[in-house]
């Protein structure tokens, strides 16, 4: 049994995104209920700390941080048609960024082997100077920057399996060879970024890997993309820490996404990342909640990931089945990335 640090807190329910908004406090309530039903002895719990202003500034501008701070105590501030702050958003968003840091610190300092931060508001659409897509501060990106700049970690892998492309995370590390950003996402879809030819720039060229996929892809197609594209690159990168932008809106029951993943798909992705982390960084891995808007799917996928994080390595992982619909995407992605990674073009 591995020790997993679970960070979740009722205060994550304090941000209110608006009436009839899918990104709602009940999402955290569903996760808390799931967590309380777990009977895992090796599960450690920690309350999140608030990210400091300096930590927010690792990824955001002074002006933008001040802009979010000014919403504190105001009943409602609109950032874009989908992204609204309430009186408690500033405090909650700082707690979300700090929650991922809490889990990452625990893993780095050996208090736990891996972690899962059940935070909201989510983060991966948040840009350096702008809130968008329900996101205010880029929780996972802040953790990655913190690992590199504060703790001297040289290579961080961010795997983003949320059904939406993490445009904010991509932009933040587009020129950085220290953070490998990989995303599977529905395409075309919100926010419109994440095509195959977006592979990074300057010293970061090759360190952004996008797998844009059409709606209706399921477990088999995702596994094939992991086995034939993402994991071979991740192994060559040799991460010193693995972060997962763990949205659960690619689940077949999700009302926003059009994918057909089951709990089994999320299990298989977690297993592959866990094996990767075992091979290169003593299993150091932290998942952070992004999207996921069906409460039952959220709780069941959350349970699947937490349980898998607790399992010791060495399990046999079934290789992906043939998934003909995934092949053209894998081939085209390899074409764009072939100068930067060794990829078997015939297989
Ligand atoms: Zn999403």
Image (cartoon, grey):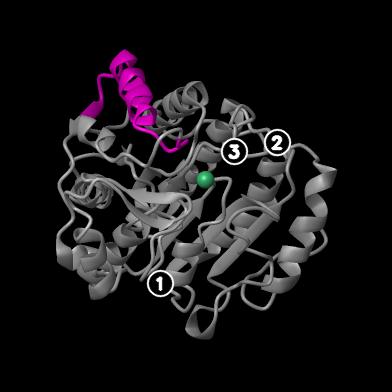
- Does residue 231 appear in this view? no
Residue 256 is marked as: 3
Question: Quick one: label 2 or label 3, which is nearer the N terminus?
Answer: 2
SS at badge 3: loop
Residue 186 as seen in the image, left or right of residue 202: right
Magenta residues (range) = 21-44
The residue under label 2 is 218
Which residue sits at x=61%, y=55%?
A: 230
- Near mark 1 (Cα within 10 A), the count class, few <14, some 14-19 or many ≥20, is many
Nearer to me, 71 or 239: 71
Q: Is mark 2 within 8 Å of ligand 1?
A: no
Which residue sits at x=47%, y=35%?
A: 22
- Near mark 3 (Cα within 10 A), the count class, few <14, some 14-19 or many ≥20, is some
Residue 287 sits in quarter = top left
Q: Is mark 3 within 8 Å of ligand 1?
A: yes
Front: mark 2 or 3: 3
Nearer to me, 248 or 228: 248
- Near mark 2 (Cα within 10 A), the count class, few <14, some 14-19 or many ≥20, is some
Coordinates of residue 316 in the picture (x, y in percent): 57, 31
Coordinates of residue 8 in the picture (x, y in percent): 26, 33
The residue under label 1 is 178
Question: Quick one: label 3 or label 1, which is nearer the N terminus?
Answer: 1
Q: CA distance from mark 2 to mark 3?
A: 15 Å
Q: Is residue 242 above or below residue 304?
A: below
Coordinates of residue 18 in the picture (x, y in percent): 38, 39
Coordinates of residue 40 in the picture (x, y in percent): 30, 19
Which residue sits at x=18%, y=50%?
A: 109
**Mark 2 and 1 residues: CB-CB less than 8 Å, in contact?**
no
SS at badge 1: loop
Front: mark 2 or 1: 2
Question: Quick one: label 2 or label 1, which is nearer the N terminus?
Answer: 1
């Amino acid at each position: 049994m591995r020790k997993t640090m679970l960070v979740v807190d009722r205060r994550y329910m304090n941000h209110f995104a608006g009436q009839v908004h899918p990104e709602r406090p009940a999402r955290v309530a569903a996760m808390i209920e799931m967590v309380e039903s777990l009977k895992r002895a090796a599960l450690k719990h920690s309350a999140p700390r608030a990210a400091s202003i300096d930590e927010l500034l690792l990824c955001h501008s002074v002006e933008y941080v001040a802009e979010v701070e000014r919403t504190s105590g105001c009943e409602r501030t609109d950032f874009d048609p989908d992204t609204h702050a309430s009186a408690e958003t500033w405090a909650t968003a700082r707690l979300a960024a700090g929650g991922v840091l809490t889990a990452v610190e625990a893993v780095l300092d050996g208090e736990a082997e891996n972690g899962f931060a059940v935070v909201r508001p989510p983060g991966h659409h948040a840009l350096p100077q702008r809130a968008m897509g329900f996101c205010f501060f880029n929780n996972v990106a802040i953790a990655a920057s913190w690992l590199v700049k504060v703790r001297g970690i040289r290579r961080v892998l961010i795997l983003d399996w949320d059904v939406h492309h993490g445009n904010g995370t991509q932009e933040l590390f587009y020129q950085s060879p220290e953070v490998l950003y990989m995303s599977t996402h529905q395409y075309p879809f919100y926010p419109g970024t994440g095509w195959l030819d977006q592979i990074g720039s300057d010293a970061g060229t090759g360190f952004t890997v996008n797998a844009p996929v059409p709606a209706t892809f399921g477990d088999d197609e995702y596994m094939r993309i992991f086995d034939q594209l993402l994991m071979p690159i991740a192994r060559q990168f040799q991460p010193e820490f693995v972060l997962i932008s763990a949205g659960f809106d690619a689940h077949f029951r999700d009302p926003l996404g059009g994918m057909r993943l089951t709990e089994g798909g999320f299990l298989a992705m977690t297993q592959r990342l866990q094996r990767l982390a075992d091979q290169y960084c003593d299993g150091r891995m932290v998942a952070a909640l992004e999207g996921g808007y069906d409460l039952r799917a959220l709780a069941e996928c959350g349970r699947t990931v937490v349980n898998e994080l607790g399992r010791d390595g060495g399990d046999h992982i079934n290789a992906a089945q043939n998934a003909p619909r995934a092949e053209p995407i894998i081939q085209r992605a390899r074409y764009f990335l072939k100068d930067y990674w060794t990829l078997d073009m015939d297989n």
